[in-house]
Image (cartoon, helix red, strand yellow):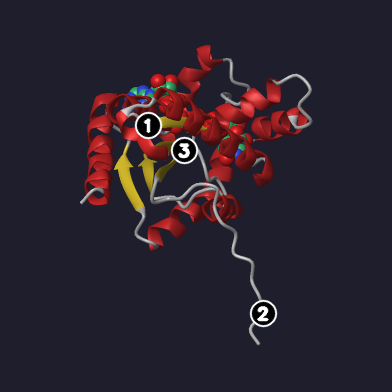
């Protein structure tokens, strides 16, 4: 007899809730572009990095020190922590939208841009299986030189502990070793739309909007 395998039921049904992962190297422009796509498509934008920074600073958090160390060292926080934060934020957003109700979100329908996640294969598999199967990945690509320049410029005002040369180099290393395989994995499934993010914010936005438009056109066809 075949062994019984427990298949988890995801918290959200991907036929009703669209999850788009937004990946790219540190400083590629993910957050900037997500903010623009929110204006166009009424997404809820969830940045895994922002959620982790909020948890790090939350009084009484048992994960504060762990998150602080990982962020400074450019390593990945254990997936259970990040996935729970994302799931909680999605649940809260769904509840809020249900009560206020905007057109794209009626009847429990939702659309999420999940920025800077999944950073590692274990996160990708676990989130897809237990929270919501993702629809696609928008992959913002540019050179390390461009990313470094942007991050150092941002570091003048961001107050981020990881916007310095030492941390940036570590983040580039983690990106190559842990995140590139995730992009490869989804690419093999035909789920990745690559957008060159070397140009101006406006140029990149135009290309990214086109990608999202196509996704919704297919979904609603
Ligand atoms: N196309 C662009 N041209 C010039 N500057 C840009 C462009 N896109 C983003 N920036 C600037 O580069 C910096 C990094 O952008 P952003 O924060 O969006 O990157 P990110 O990929 O989200 O980075 P991280 O992963 O480190 O959070 C910001 O200061 C932003 O204003
Ligand atoms: O899924 C994730 C996402 C992020 N981290 C950690 O946070 C920092 C900053 O992330 P940004 O997306 O650049 O804001 C990242 O370097 C990781 O240390 C994570 O562990 N898991």
Res. 89 in view: yes
- Across and down, in percent, residue 175 comes to 53, 44
In this view, the residue in front, 154 or 53, is: 53
Q: Quadrant of residue 199?
A: top left
Res. 149 in view: no
Horizontal relation, residue 83 to residue 12: left or right? right
Mark in the foreground, 2 or 3: 2
Q: Are marks 3 and 1 in contact (CB under 8 Å)?
A: no
Work out how far the residue at label 3 is from the one at label 1, CA to CA, in angstroms.
10 Å
- Across and down, in percent, residue 207 comes to 24, 37
Residue at x-position 39% and y-position 63%: 188
Location of mark 3 (residue): 114
Return the residue found at the far top.
Answer: 157
Secondary structure beneath label 2: loop
Secondary structure beneath label 1: loop
Residue at x-position 45% and y-position 52%: 183
């Amino acid at each position: 007899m075949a062994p019984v395998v427990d298949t988890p039921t995801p918290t959200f049904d991907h036929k009703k809730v669209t999850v788009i992962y937004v990946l790219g190297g540190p400083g590629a422009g993910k957050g900037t572009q997500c903010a623009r796509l929110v204006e166009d498509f009424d997404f809820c934008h969830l940045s895994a990095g922002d959620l982790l920074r909020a948890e790090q600073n939350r009084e009484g958090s048992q994960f504060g020190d762990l998150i602080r160390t990982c962020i400074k060292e450019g390593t990945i926080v254990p997936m259970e922590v990040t996935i729970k934060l994302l799931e909680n934020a999605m649940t809260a957003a769904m509840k809020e939208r249900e009560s206020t109700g905007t057109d794209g979100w009626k009847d429990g329908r939702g659309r999420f841009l999940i920025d800077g996640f999944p950073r590692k294969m274990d996160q990708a598999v676990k989130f897809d299986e237990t929270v919501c199967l993702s629809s696609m990945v928008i992959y913002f690509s540019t050179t390390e030189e461009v990313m470094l320049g942007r991050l150092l410029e941002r570091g003048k005002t961001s107050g981020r502990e990881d916007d310095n040369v030492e941390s940036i180099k570590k983040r580039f290393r983690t990106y190559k070793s842990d995140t590139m395989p995730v992009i490869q994995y989804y690419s093999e499934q035909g789920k990745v739309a690559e957008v060159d993010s070397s140009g101006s914010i406006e140029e990149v936005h135009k290309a990214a909007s086109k990608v999202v438009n196509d996704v919704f056109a297919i979904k609603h066809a």
